[in-house]
């Protein structure tokens, strides 16, 4: 994690991108990446994250807006002079060149040859732990090793900025987890300012210092993984991020108080006040399974539902409880209550999440 007050290294101001006559791929994106920081651009397919990465790299031109890297405006600098290292999803290695030649290529292009080039290639191979494989051809490497060659090729030019485009998506699930740790470790060691594109929230949350959650050409929230998880700014962020993500349940006002799906819900005082301030407009309560537990009786912040089914997940159970037509999963280490039994579910959260069902905006408590 960089110093909290590390200077901004990459500054993106009001960038808009329109490809054709349709809706812009990026509406108006402003972001800053501090020196030494690892930023993840996270969002569903089509939200504009690759477009933003391409504009930073100079592979696409913004329709409007400005960007600066290390204090220098990027707009007038052609791609090859931006000192930006890129790792593409496909790795884009030259298949007819050895690992050594693939890594050396960027140095040749910059006129760096001889001993200096040898030193840099060896250093890059060492950084990604590929020593001893420099004479291999790419097709004689595993997917994970090819990915590391692509990383070494990006690092060898000692870039001011590293861009990673879905770097783990071509790896199998097991390898993905270990390469995730490798890339983060490498980042800790060399502290290179990095921007990674991913649609995988777990990848973004585990690897990045800060995450920019994008949807529909906008950045919805830009903050640390902890803040994004604990204080999602909108219903979209709450349901996109987290393992498990939040589920949203509509809260009704009833003759006897409050309810969810026709079952009794006892809010806390602050939650009740926030619901009442809506003047009868519906609200959505955002709940995450890991913040739910069973209680012996109804009390503040409890919902009473009916046990629907349960699954043993090794050491504990996940109990699915019906709240009318809604279902929520509650973890428990104790043997789960029997099917059909009433169950009181406690929300273990000081400030539960509340959202406007129309705009998705957070409703303040
Ligand atoms: P994915 O994860 O699927 O790659 P993304 O979030 O990276 O998605 P972009 O690839 O940036 O999204 O695309 C954003 C929008 O811009 C999409 O609607 C896409 O169809 C459109 N788009 C992207 N590239 C072009 C292009 N070269 N010409 C026209 N439209 C494009």
Image: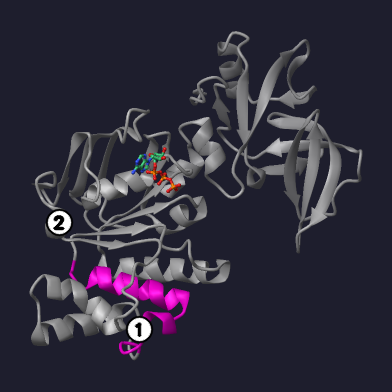
346 vs 242, nearest the viewer: 242
Q: Which residue corresponds to the image point at 39% horizontal and 71% vertical from the top-left?
A: 147
Are there few (<14), some (14-19), or many (20+) residues within 10 Å of tag 2?
some
294 sits to left or right of 170: right
Q: Which region is colored magenta?
A: 133-158
Are there few (<14), some (14-19), or many (20+) residues within 10 Å of tag 1?
some
Name the magenta segment's main secondary structure. helix
Q: Which residue corresponds to the image point at 29% horizontal and 74% vertical from the top-left?
A: 152
Residue corresponding to mark 1: 130
Number of the front mark, 2 or 1 = 2
Q: Is residue 94 magenta?
A: no
Q: Going from the N terminus, do you reach mark 2 or mark 1 first?
A: 2
Q: Is residue 142 magenta?
A: yes
223 vs 337, nearest the viewer: 223
131 sits to left or right of 109: right
Which colour assignment does the render follow? one colour
Element carrying mark 1: loop
Query: Residue 253, position in %: x, y?
Result: 70, 14
Element carrying mark 2: loop
Q: Quadrant of ligand 1?
A: top left
Instruction: Specify the label residue 169 is tagged with.
Output: none
Q: Are marks 2 and 1 in contact (CB under 8 Å)?
A: no
Alpha carbon distance from label 2 to label 1: 27 Å
Rendered view: 201 above or below 207: above
Residue corresponding to mark 2: 82
């Amino acid at each position: 994690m960089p110093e909290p007050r590390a200077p901004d290294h990459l500054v993106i101001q009001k960038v808009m991108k329109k490809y054709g006559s349709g809706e812009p791929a990026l509406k108006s994106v402003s972001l800053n990446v501090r020196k030494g920081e690892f930023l993840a651009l996270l969002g569903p397919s089509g939200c504009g994250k690759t477009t933003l990465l391409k504009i930073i790299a100079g592979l696409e031109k913004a329709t409007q807006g400005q960007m600066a890297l290390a204090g220098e405006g990027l707009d007038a600098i052609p791609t090859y002079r931006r000192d930006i290292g890129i790792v593409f999803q496909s790795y884009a290695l030259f298949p007819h060149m050895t690992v050594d030649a693939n890594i050396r290529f960027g140095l040749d292009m910059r006129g760096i040859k001889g001993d200096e080039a040898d030193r840099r290639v060896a250093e890059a191979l060492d950084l990604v732990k590929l020593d001893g494989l420099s004479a291999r051809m790419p097709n004689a490497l595993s997917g994970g090793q090819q990915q590391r060659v692509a990383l070494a090729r990006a690092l060898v030019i000692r870039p001011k900025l590293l861009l990673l485009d879905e770097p783990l998506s071509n790896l199998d699930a097991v390898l993905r987890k270990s390469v995730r740790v490798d890339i983060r470790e490498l980042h800790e060691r060399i502290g290179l300012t990095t921007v990674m594109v991913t649609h995988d929230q777990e990848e973004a949350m585990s690897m990045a210092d800060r995450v920019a959650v994008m949807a529909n050409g906008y950045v919805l929230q830009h903050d640390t993984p902890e803040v994004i998880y604990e204080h999602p700014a909108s219903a979209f962020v709450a349901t996109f991020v987290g393992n498990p993500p939040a589920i949203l349940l509509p809260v009704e006002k009833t003759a006897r108080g409050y309810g969810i799906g026709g079952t009794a819900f006892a809010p806390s005082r602050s939650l009740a006040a926030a619901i009442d301030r809506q003047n009868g407009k519906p609200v959505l309560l955002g709940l995450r399974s890991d913040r739910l537990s069973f209680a012996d009786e109804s009390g503040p912040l409890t919902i009473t539902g009916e046990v629907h089914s349960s699954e043993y997940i090794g050491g504990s159970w996940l109990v699915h409880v019906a709240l009318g037509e809604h279902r929520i999963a509650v973890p428990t280490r104790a043997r789960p209550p029997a099917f059909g039994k009433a169950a009181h579910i406690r929300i273990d959260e000081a400030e539960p999440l509340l959202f406007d069902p129309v705009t998705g905006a957070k409703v303040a408590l």
